[in-house]
Amino acid sequence: MRDGIALIAFTDRGEVQAERLAAFLGGTACRAGQALTLGQWTEQNFRTRTGLVFVGAVGIAVRAVAPYLQNKTEDPAVVVADELGRFVIPLLSGHLGGANRLAEDIAEFLGGTAVITTATDLNGLFAVDLWAKAQNMLVLQPERIKQVSGKLLRGETVSIGCGWPILGNLPSNVRLGSAEDVLVDYRRHSTEALQLIPRNLTLGVGCRRGCEAETLEEGFARFCEERGVRPEAVSAAASIDRKADEEGLLLFCERHDWKLHFFTAEELKSATGDYSASLFVEAAVGVDNVCERAAVLDSGGALVESKYAGNGVTFALAEQKTSFDWSW
């Protein structure tokens, strides 16, 4: 999981501005050449921060980040602000990384101008990647974003297929219906459309005592593959409180950055519905099923994938109550 915003400056005036911005953004600021050189600072922060802010010249920032660029789904937001606060330029990851929004926030705070250059923003059009980020969806094929944006820039209508309610007014040149251009779903599909994966699934987990994280990883991958579910859709995990000290389970969830919740046997029994019962499990932990009941209780929704068992682990998936809106 990435930390917050890191800022760097190169002059006395720039350092003062960086310190002000750090206080405003809840980030950290430094002066190049003091504790770290510019190269050391960039290398240290590029993969660990959600955003980098250079208070100085654009050219300095471009040369600093160039060796570390990957793609728009991995690169952090990179923003450049001049030391007087007149202009703030989102340099990298404007939409998915949030650089455009960060630049606008900084410009408003400094009383300057955010220099936004992305075409959909300039033309006031629906930005599918920005919308996906705001709705906590993963963009599965970022290279297809340009297909959607290209149609909008040509004045054409894009079609979005989504099985959940989307509140508010439809943006211009967007219609709901077929997934011709955009598909919102956590299932695996063979499609030419841009797929957005909502992170709205809770994983219920059961495991034998001393189960290693690698065993859980392998089982989870097989489970998702067999059931046709994108693993990126999982945003939380749940189990029985007897597993609260299982190092393998804790590490498994930490690697995926999932919140892990535990329930007592009595709480699991309170989950309404029909579940795969096991007399062995009931004798061992006091309730006939852990993974399905835990998933349903934690999600507050419905079971969408029933119990999977193999190599000492069990999994189930429940869908959280889900709706989206057209804001971004």
Image: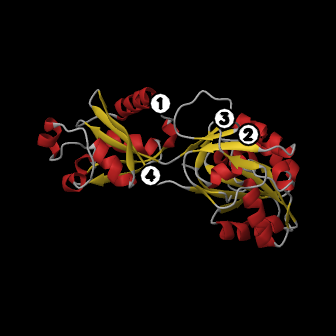
Asked if the residues shown at circle 1 and circle 4 are in contact, with their CB atoms under 8 angstroms apart, the answer is no
Q: Mark 2 and mark 4: span between their CA atoms?
A: 27 Å
Q: Which residue is mark 3?
A: 141
For marks 2 and 4, the one nearer the N-term is 2
Q: Is residue 65 visible?
A: yes
Residue 151, horizontal then vertical, whole percent: 81, 41
Asked if the residues shown at circle 4 and circle 3 are in contact, with their CB atoms under 8 angstroms apart, the answer is no
Instruction: Say which element carries label 3.
Output: loop
Q: Which residue is mark 2?
A: 145
Task: Decide: few, some or many residues near mark 2? Use Cα within 10 Å; few <14, some 14-19, many ≥20.
Answer: some
Instruction: Say which element carries label 1.
Output: loop
Instruction: Say which element carries label 2.
Output: helix
- Could you say which disc has been placed on residue 320 in the image? 4
Q: For residue 289, which quarter of the picture? A: top left
- State the residue at coordinates (39%, 52%): 301
Q: Mark 4 and mark 3: span between their CA atoms?
A: 24 Å
Q: Mark 3 and mark 2: span between their CA atoms?
A: 8 Å
Task: Decide: few, some or many residues near mark 3? Use Cα within 10 Å; few <14, some 14-19, many ≥20.
Answer: few
Frontmost of labels 2 and 4 is 4
Residue 314, horizontal then vertical, whole percent: 30, 35
Q: Amino acid at mark 3?
A: Gln
Q: For residue 169, which quarter of the picture? A: bottom right
Q: Which residue is mark 1?
A: 228
Q: Amino acid at mark 4?
A: Gln
Name the side, left or right, on which 248 lies relative to 171.
Answer: left
Q: Mark 1 and mark 2: span between their CA atoms?
A: 24 Å
Asked if the residues shown at circle 1 and circle 2 are in contact, with their CB atoms under 8 angstroms apart, the answer is no
